[in-house]
Image: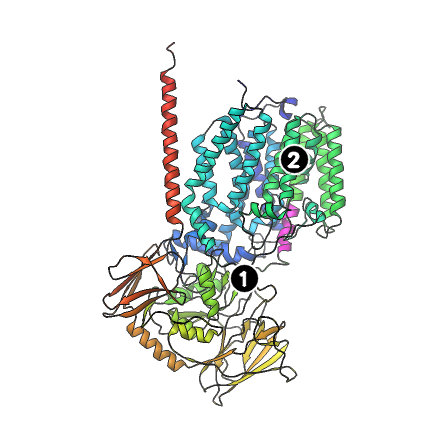
Amino acid sequence: MRPTVPPEPKTLGDRTGEQPPAGPGRAALLAATITVLVLCAADAVARSHPFGPRTRNVNDLGNQYVPFHAHLWDLLHGRGTGGLLVNWQSGYGASFLPDLGTYLTSPFALLVALFPREQIDLAVYVITVLKIACAGAAMTWLLLRLRPGRWWAAGLLGASYALCGWTVATASYNLMWLDGLIALPLLCLVGEWVLSGRRPLLGVLVVTAVWIANFYTAYMATLAAVLVFLLRLWPAGLPYRRTLAAAGRAAVTFALGIGLAAPLVTVVYFGSAHASEGRFTRFAPVGTEDLLARLLPTTYSYGSPALFVGTTALLLALALPFHRAAPRRVRAGWTLLVLVVTLSMQWGPTHLMWHAFAAPQGSSYRQTFVVCALLVMAAWHALSYGPLDRRALGAAAGLLALIAAVASGSQLVRSFAWPVFLTAALGALLGLVLLGRERPVLRVAPAALAAVLLVGVQLGEATATDAVATRMRFGHMDDYAPWGDRQRQQADAIDRSDGWPRYRTDPGREQTVGNDPLELGGQGAQYYSSHTSAVLSSTLTALGFGWTSGGRSLQSLDNAVTDAVFSVGARVHSPPDPHQNWFPQDGSAVTVTREDVPPLVTVRPSAATGAFGPSPYRNQELLLGARVYTLPRITVLNGAGKRPYRSTDRRQGVRVGARATITARCRAGSEVYLWAPYFSGTARLAGPSAYGPTGRFRADWRPLTKIAAMARLGTVPDSGRLTIELSANRLGVVPDQAVGCLDTGRLHTVVRQLRATGATRVTVSGSGGTLRAALPAGSKGVAVVAAPRIAGWRCAAGDGALVPARQYHGLVAVPLDGTATSVTCAFRPPGLRLGTAIGGGSLAVLAGLGVFGAVRRRRGVNMQPVA
C-alpha cells in the first residue's frame, strides 16, 4: 500500500550532513525572537509608543480596539456597566456579544487583566507583539511539518511571514486580524494531521479556537488551508478512494470545528446583519506597478496589497519553478497556487469571496496575508530540496530585477526604498550562494556565514519596512493620545457622578476617542463598532446627533431635550482634546453638570403616533411628548452681506463658505441651538449670553462620512434678536430650520410630569440582559425604556410572558393596560439560539465519532491473535 506522502529527495539538511532537529521548538523560538526584535526596533526607530513619544493609537486602534480592551479589563475586574449580553455604556444600550466575538474573544485579549487599568495602551501593544511572534512560531512549525530542513532557515522564513507587509502596514493596528495570521498555519497543520490520520480531536478543537478568536480572518485562513490541503493531496498520488477519504476527513474536521464555534459566529453574523450600512468603497484593482511595488521593502500605501515577505523569501519563491531538485508537481503546484491566489485579489467576484461576500469598509486587501503565507511556503519548498543551482538562482535574480524595474514606475517606491532593497537583494543573493558551497570560507562553515547574513538581511529590511509604515500612517490617519491626565480627570469626574441605573452619566460632547464610555466609564450615546445598529444610528440622526465613519461612530449630543429623553442626569464637560489640533484650546477644566431627569423607564399615555420628519427639533418633541421649541424664520447672509445661493443637491438649505451670519428672533432667555449637519467650521452666538466655547462642527459631504451634531450656543438676549457668526473651513450648507429656541421652563414642566408617572425603581441584572422597573399603580398607555429597540429585546408587563418588544420612535416599548405594576425586559442576541443548536449538534456528533472510534480500536485490539 502506498504511503500518504511519497518519499522525497534528500533535504538541504541531509546534503550538508546536518540531521533534522528532533522538534521544531528551537526554530519556532528563533522566529519569535526575530519577530519581537524587529517590532521593538522598528518602533524605537519610528519613536512610537512605548519606545518614543508618538502614539500608536491611529484610526480604529485608538477609536475602537483600545477602548474595547479597556471595557474587557473592567468586566474581568467586575467594574463594567452591563455584562456579556448588553453593554449599557455605549449607544444607550448595545448588544455586546457581537462586539465580544469580533474584537475580544482571542485568548490573548485576556492578558489585559494582568496590567494596571491606566496601562491599557501598553497591554494592547504587548498583546500585538505576542500575536505576531506566535504567528511566526506557528508558521515555522508548519514549514518543518511540510518538509524537513534546516531549523534556522525555517525560523527565518517563519519570521518573514510574521513580519510580512500586511502585518506591519495593516494588521499591527487592527490587532484582532492578527488572529488570522496565527490561524492560517494552524489550520494548515490540521490539514497535515488529516493527511496522516493523526490528532482528529485536536484538529477539531484547533478549528474551533481560531474561528472563535476572529471568525472574519479565520474564514480567509480556512479558504487558504483548503487550497493548501488540496495541493498537498495532488503530488501524494493516493488512490482515488484514499483521496476521497482524506478529503472527507478534512471536511468533517472543519465542519465540526466551525459548528462548535457557531454560538458565537452566528451572533456575530446577525449582529452585522442588523448593523448600520456604514460607508463601503467600490472595489478597483491596483495597477501592476503598485502591485509589484508592494513586494519590495519600505513601500507603503493604504489601498494596495502589502505583499512584502522579505527579499530572501521572495528570491526563493521566484526560484522554485526553476529548481530542478524539486519534483515537477511541487514546482508547478506551488507556483500556480501563488499566482492564482494573487490574481484572485484583483478580480471583483473572487476578491469579494475572500471577504465573505461583504464589501470591506476601509482597507480593501485584508486577505493579503494569504498570499504572503503561500509565498513563504513556496520559498520553503525551494530551500528544503537543497541549495539553488546557478540556473535557479540566476532566474530568480532576473525575475527580481524585472519586478524592481516594473515597480520603479510606481509612486509607492520612494527614494529611500532603493538603498534598502539593493542592500537586501545583494545580501540575500550572497547568502543563498554561500548555502551552495561545501568548502569553508575563511575557515568558517558556509552555512554559518549564510545564516548570519540572511538573518541580518531579514532584521534590517523588516525593521526598515515596519518603521516606514509606522511613520507614514500618521500622514493620512487620525491619531489619538494614549491614556494620560485628560482621561484620568474625565474618568474621576464620571466616577464621582455615576448614578446608574437611576440616571445616565454621559462622558461629554468633547470626545477623546470614538468609544469614550468604554474607555472612561459612564453611559452615553457614543459608540463606534462594526455592529452599531441601524435603528440606533437612524434614531439618533433624526434627533440631531452627529456621526463619523458613515454612521457607525455615533457622537454625544449636549442637548437638554435628548438628555431628558435618555435619562442623562449628569454630563461631563471637557475642553477640546489638546492632542487634536482642529480648534484652539480654551484652557477650561473638566466639569460636571447635573439635571433632574425622568427615570430610565417612563410611561406615555398612548403608543407612538406619526413618524420622524426632517426637523430634529420636532423629532425630539415627538419623542418627548410635548412642544418645547420655537423654530424662528432665519436670515442667512454671506461675508459680503448678501443672501447666499441655495444648495443644488439633496442637502436642503443655503450654501455658505468662509464667513456668514444667521439672524433670527426668539423669546428672550430661551436656549439657542444650531443644527447644521453639513456645515464644517465654527459657530458662535454674538453677545455676552453665549455659552463658553464656540460651537464646533465637522462634516464631510462627498463622500458622506461625517455629519455635524446639533450644538447649544447660548441664550437669547433680552432684545429677542440673536445673531450667529459662522466661520466655515469648507463649503457647506445651512438648512432652513437650522435654529431652534428651547423653552427651558416648559421642558422642566414636562420632565416633572414624566418623573411623577415614570418608574419608581429600575434594576439591571449583572449580565446586563434583564431590566426590571416598578411602576405606579394604574399605569396605562405604554412604558418606554430609554434604550434603542435593537433586535433581541423581549418584554412583558407584570407577570405576562415575554414577547418581542414594541417600539416607540426607535425606543423599547411595552403596552400597559392599567393592571401591571412592573415591567420586565430581557435581551437575547439574535442568532444565539440557532448557534447554540448548531454547536450542541456538533458536540453530539463529535462525541459519537469519538465513542465509535474508541469501540472500533478496542475491537481491533481484541481481535489480534495471541502470540
Report which quarter residue 60 is drawn in: bottom right
Query: Contact, CB < 8 Å: mark 2 with mark 1?
Result: no
Q: Amino acid at mark 2?
A: Leu
Q: Position of residue 200 (x, y in %)?
A: 44, 30
Q: Position of residue 561 (x, y in %)?
A: 41, 74
Q: Which residue is mark 2?
A: 336
Does residue 549 appear anywhere in the picture?
yes
Relative vertical location of residue 551 with respect to residue 69 in this rendering, above or below: below
Q: Which residues are magenta?
A: 463-473
Image check: 546 left or right of 728? left
* N-term mark: 2 or 1: 2
In front here: 785 or 71? 785
Q: Position of residue 692 (x, y in %)?
A: 50, 77
Q: Label 2's element?
A: helix
Q: Position of residue 17 (x, y in %)?
A: 63, 21
Q: Which residue is mark 1?
A: 550
In front here: 574 or 551? 551
